Structure formats: C-alpha cells, structure tokens
Image (cartoon, grey):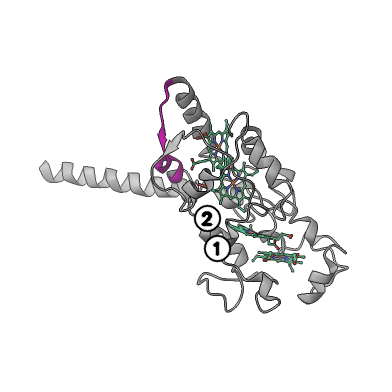
Amino acid sequence: MKVMSVCAVIVAALFTIVSGQSLAADAPFEGRKKCSSCHKAQASSWKDTAHAKAMESLKPNVKAEAKQKANLDPAKDYTQDKDCVGCHVDGFGQKGGYTIDSPKKMLTGVGCESCHGPGRNYRGDHRKSGQAFEKKGKTTKRSVLAKKGQDFHFEERCSACHLNYEGSPWKDAKPPYTPYTPEVDAKYTFNFDEMVKDVKAMHEHYKLDGVFEGEPKFKFHEEFQASAKTTKKGK
Ligand code: HEC
Ligand code: HEC
Ligand code: HEC
Ligand code: HEC
C-alpha cells in the first residue's frame, strides 16, 4: 500500500512537471491584437520600429542596396519565400503562427509574441492578475506566466533570428539562415546586452504598477523601470 501511494505521488509529480513544460512549449501564438489593446503605449512605440516593418523589407525594390550587399535580388518579391519570412513574422511554422497561405496582419512583422513568447495561454492571466491587483492589491508570481509560455529572458528568441547563420557563435543555428551576418557588414554583429537596450528597436518602456513579482525577472528589468516613462494608464 505504502509503495503504491509513493508511486502515485511520483507519477502525479511527473505529470505536473511534464504538463507544466508542455503547456509552455505548445503555447499557441494568436497575434498582437489583444496585447496591443491593453498595452497601448508599447504598441504605439513598437509600430515605428524596424521589427514592425520587417515584412516591408521583403518587398521588391525595398532596401535595394542592402539586398545587393547580401547577394539578394533587389527586384525579387521575397514576401512569400519560406526561406525568408520565418524571421520577418511571428511564430512561423509554430502553432497559431504566421502562414504563407493565409497571412494574418496581426502576425506580420516581428511583433510582441516573437520576444515575449506565444501569448494565447498567458494573456488571460494578465487580465485576471491586473483585476486582482486593482481590487485587492494582490500581486501574482511571474512563475505562473513563465509556465504558460511567457519569456522573461529573451536571448534565445533573439538569437534564433539574429544569430542564425553558418559559423555563428549560437550553437543551435540551422537553415534557413539570415543573409545578414557580420561577414556581410560588421554592423550586423549581434550583441544581446547592447541591442536589447535599443528602445528604437524594441519599444519605449513604461512604468509598471508591479502586478507581477518574483523570478523569472528580466536581468535589466529594474534598470528599464528606473528610467521608464509614465502613461495615464501606466500600461
Ligand atoms: C486584458 C489586458 C491585457 C492583455 C490582453 C495583455 N496584458 Fe500584458 N499585462 C496586463 C497587466 C494588467 C499587466 C501588469 C501591469 C503592471 O504591473 O502595471 C501586464 C503586464 C505585462 C508585462 C510585464 C510583465 C512583468 O515582468 O512584470 C508584459 C511584458 C506584458 N504584459 C506583455 C503582454 C503581451 C506580449 C501580451 C499579448 C500576448 C499581453 N501582455 C496581453 C494586461 C494585459
Ligand atoms: C522573429 C525574428 C526576430 C526576433 C525574435 C528578434 N528580431 Fe531583431 N530583427 C529581426 C529582423 C528581421 C530585423 C530587421 C527588420 C527589417 O529592417 O526588415 C531586426 C532588427 C533588429 C534591430 C535593428 C537593427 C538596426 O539596423 O537598427 C535590433 C537592435 C534588433 N533587431 C534587436 C533584437 C533583440 C535584442 C531581440 C530580442 C529581444 C530581437 N531583435 C528579436 C528579427 C528578429
Ligand atoms: C534566420 C533569420 C532570417 C532569415 C531566414 C532571413 N532574415 Fe532577413 N533579417 C534577419 C535579421 C535578424 C535582420 C536584421 C539584421 C540587422 O540589422 O542586424 C534581417 C534584415 C533583413 C533586411 C534589412 C537589412 C538592412 O540592412 O536594412 C532585408 C532586406 C532582409 N532581411 C531580407 C531577407 C530576405 C530577402 C531573406 C530571404 C532570402 C531573409 N531576409 C531571410 C533575419 C533573417
Ligand atoms: C524585439 C523584442 C520586443 C518586442 C517585439 C516587443 N517587446 Fe515588449 N519588451 C521587450 C523587452 C526587452 C522588455 C523589457 C522587459 C523587462 O523589463 O522586464 C519589454 C517590456 C515590455 C513590457 C513591460 C513594461 C515596459 O514597457 O517595459 C510590456 C507591457 C511589453 N513589453 C509589451 C509589449 C507589446 C504589447 C508588444 C507588441 C506590440 C511588445 N512588447 C513587443 C522586448 C520586446
């Protein structure tokens, strides 16, 4: 009997671990519409970034010089090329993500979920936690969001696009590779700690009320919040 119940506890624990992990790994993308309606300030700042306009770059005769430099054909339309779109949209080849056959506006360009993680499973918790904070001052642990697919470290996600080329320092590189490598021009060198502070490429940062607490917390979170702007709604 004792052995049986110990087994049951172990099985239950394993199930929790496995299902917790797969919840994050399988989390579906759904596009930036919902994120943007709550986080208006970030969304409007993001709209002016190169990430937001990444699909434009795949159109014919856009960024012709940069294309020539990388031995691409400036006159060619690359907007439906599977060797290109993956890094210029959200969630290509993943559940709920961008597809070439039925392209969705809210997944076009490098949007919220490309950095923050596929949002379908965690964004409901943002709403609930925001309400609990407003009504009762109750905070929620970030670990709850992380289990549902929200990313608080970013680096692996950036690397999958920026460091995905042959001979890259990033060990998981596999084709299709980015045409823009440090060999094409030193300005394409990716340095996470510097680049992630570029608000012109991410978005401006705005002061949070502190609804979420604890680890995992982004390593520059306090630094960003210390100089963050305020909005009427704060979010
Ligand atoms: C219903 C409204 C709502 C939606 C939808 C929503 N959020 Fe949030 N989000 C919030 C609230 C409320 C907070 C807590 C803000 C605070 O602390 O002031 C928050 C916090 C955050 C934070 C800060 C987390 C931290 O470390 O403290 C990030 C990043 C974020 N949201 C991104 C997103 C993304 C990406 C999406 C879409 C996938 C999204 N949110 C959808 C309401 C929402
Ligand atoms: C889904 C792929 C993808 C992800 C994820 C991604 N990027 Fe990018 N990034 C791009 C593309 C594509 C461009 C160029 C857009 C264009 O001009 O068409 C870009 C542009 C940039 C630029 C602007 C470079 C310039 O010339 O000014 C910076 C800085 C940058 N990214 C940093 C980051 C950081 C930091 C992260 C992670 C927090 C990140 N990116 C995540 C694909 C990605
Ligand atoms: C593995 C991811 C990846 C793939 C695949 C990819 N790109 Fe990109 N692309 C990027 C990143 C990252 C940048 C931003 C580089 C930077 O500014 O540091 C970028 C930037 C660009 C730019 C702007 C360069 C500039 O200097 O403004 C163009 C144009 C572009 N890509 C076209 C293409 C085309 C065409 C293809 C297919 C042949 C393609 N990309 C495939 C990741 C990718
Ligand atoms: C290229 C990567 C990237 C993209 C795209 C991106 N973010 Fe962020 N975002 C970040 C980083 C990095 C932080 C800083 C995280 C921290 O301080 O904990 C951040 C922070 C936030 C925060 C916390 C408050 C703040 O302003 O710092 C919210 C809310 C947020 N992002 C929402 C969004 C929404 C909504 C979108 C899409 C419209 C989006 N983000 C697109 C990288 C990105």
Query: Is 140 in front, or is 21?
Result: 140
Q: Which residue occupies 68% across, 46% down?
A: 46
Residue placed furthest toward the left:
2
Q: Quick check: is 145 in the magenta stretch?
A: yes
Q: Quick check: is 16 in the magenta stretch?
A: no
**Which residue is identified by label 1?**
192
Q: Could you tell me residue 130's position as x and y percent? A: 50, 29
Snapshot quadrant of residue 188: bottom right
Q: Is residue 100 left or right of residue 149?
A: right
Q: Which residue occupies 49% across, 23% down?
A: 134
Snapshot quadrant of residue 13: top left
Residue placed furthest toward the top:
135
Residue placed furthest toward the front:
227
Q: Which residues are magenta?
A: 136-146
The circle on residue 154 is 2
Secondary structure of the residue carrying numbered label 1: helix
Q: Could you tell me residue 58's position as x and y percent? A: 79, 61
> Is residue 5 visible in this depiction of the protein?
yes
Q: Could you tell me residue 16's position as x and y percent? A: 34, 44
Lower sequence index among marks 2 and 1: 2
Any atom of ligand 2 within 8 Å of the CB at mark 1?
yes
User: Decide: marks 2, 1 in contact (CB < 8 A)?
Assistant: yes
Q: Which residue occupies 85% across, 68% down?
A: 64
